[in-house]
Image (tube, coloured by chain):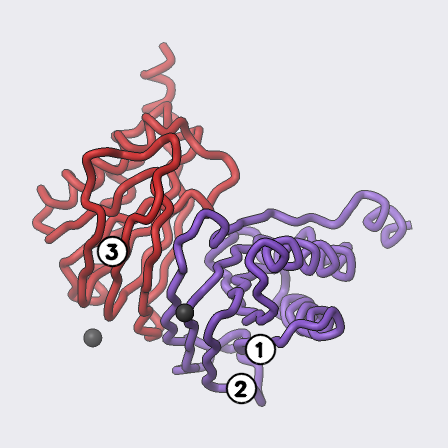
Chain colours: A red, B purple
């Protein structure tokens, strides 16, 4: 998973047009003030350990949350962060799992829909801890167990 | 080079704080309406063929320009698009070369400064041709010539 986290003043989006992989029903438009925006691209290697990668993503978000004292997250699918994407089904599963895990960890969470062309506006605060990116891969132990 | 192009209603930025690689003098704040925002991460392999990669980047921007009829570009350094960055000196050289090449191709161009923490706001239009990403690498011929 490629993860790009932005500490934002504001994020808003509006679903404009479906691709053939569009989630439906979905939340077609939404916004969030003072949130961490988690732009996510679920990648092919993640298919061997979704749960593990989601756990790592939550840890990265907790790290930024600790630095910014921000407990709101907008999970935002962003395929353009990777050139080695997972299947769309797996991506939706991972994004929903991330949403659930963040809520369980006590975050206020929103999730933009997968597979739609969307307009969006995002404002990055610009302080030194307002951007963080990570490439997350399932740990070898998890992959071995799943493949055995 | 990782390149993320966004057809935007609006982009604005403000340089907030220097890193140790900060360009100075620079344009500390600017904005552009109705522009293509070219988020760029210059990568280690680009060091073997900057001119070639810049030519490819201009071609990608021309492609999006042809689809959107937009002739304005904001070149925006965005290290978070890659985990294999070039040296800062090479990155600045490549970004300046991209700015110059785009101007020579008839684009109206602005360039956000390298090496600063910046606040920014970007609005993506959201039509099907409003986002495009590319991983560009120097062609083998160029690399062979430079290494021979
Ligand atoms: Mg605010
Ligand atoms: Mg407009």
- Same subunit, labels 1 and 3: the answer reads no
- Same subunit, labels 2 and 1: the answer reads yes
**Which residue is nearer to you in this view: B101 or B113?**
B101
Which chain's residue wears label 1?
A: B
Which chain's residue wears label 2?
A: B
Image quarter where the C terminus of chain A lies is top left
Q: Tell me if label 2 and label 1 are in contact, CB under 8 Å.
A: yes
Q: How far apart are marks 2 and 1 (CA)?
A: 9 Å
Q: How far apart are marks 2 and 3 (CA)?
A: 32 Å
Say which of marks 2 and 1 sits in front: 1
The residue at 47%/54% (across/down) is B130
Image quarter where the N terminus of chain A lies is top left
Q: How many marks?
A: 3
Determine crowd level at label 2: few under 14, some 14-19, many 20+ residues with C-alpha closer than 10 A. Answer: some
> Which residue in the protein does label 2 denote?
B27
In this picture, residue A41 sits left or right of residue B103: left
> Is the CB of mark 3 within 8 Å of ligand 1?
no
Residue B44: where, in percent of width, then height? 65, 54
Say which of marks 1 and 3 sits in front: 1
Q: How far apart are marks 1 and 3 (CA)?
A: 34 Å
> Is the CB of mark 1 within 8 Å of ligand 2?
no
Secondary structure under badge 2? loop
> Which residue in the protein does label 3 denote?
A63
Residue B127: where, in percent of width, then height? 42, 52
Q: Taking the image as four quarters, which one is ligand 1 found in?
A: bottom left
**Residue B53 figure quarter:** bottom right
């Amino acid at each position: 998973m490629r993860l790009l986290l932005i500490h934002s003043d504001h994020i808003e989006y509006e679903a404009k047009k479906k691709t053939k992989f569009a989630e439906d029903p979905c939340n077609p438009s939404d916004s969030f003030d003072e949130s961490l925006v988690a732009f996510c691209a679920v990648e092919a290697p993640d298919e061997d350990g979704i749960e593990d990668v989601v756990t790592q993503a939550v840890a990265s978000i907790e790290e930024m949350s600790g630095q910014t004292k921000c407990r709101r997250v907008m999970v935002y699918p962003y395929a353009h962060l990777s050139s080695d994407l997972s299947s769309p089904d797996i991506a939706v599963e991972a994004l929903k799992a991330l949403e659930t895990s963040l809520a369980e960890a006590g975050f206020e969470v929103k999730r933009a829909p997968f597979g739609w062309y969307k307009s969006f506006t995002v404002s990055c605060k610009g302080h030194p801890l307002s951007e963080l990116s990570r490439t997350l891969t399932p740990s070898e132990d998890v992959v071995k167990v799943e493949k055995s």
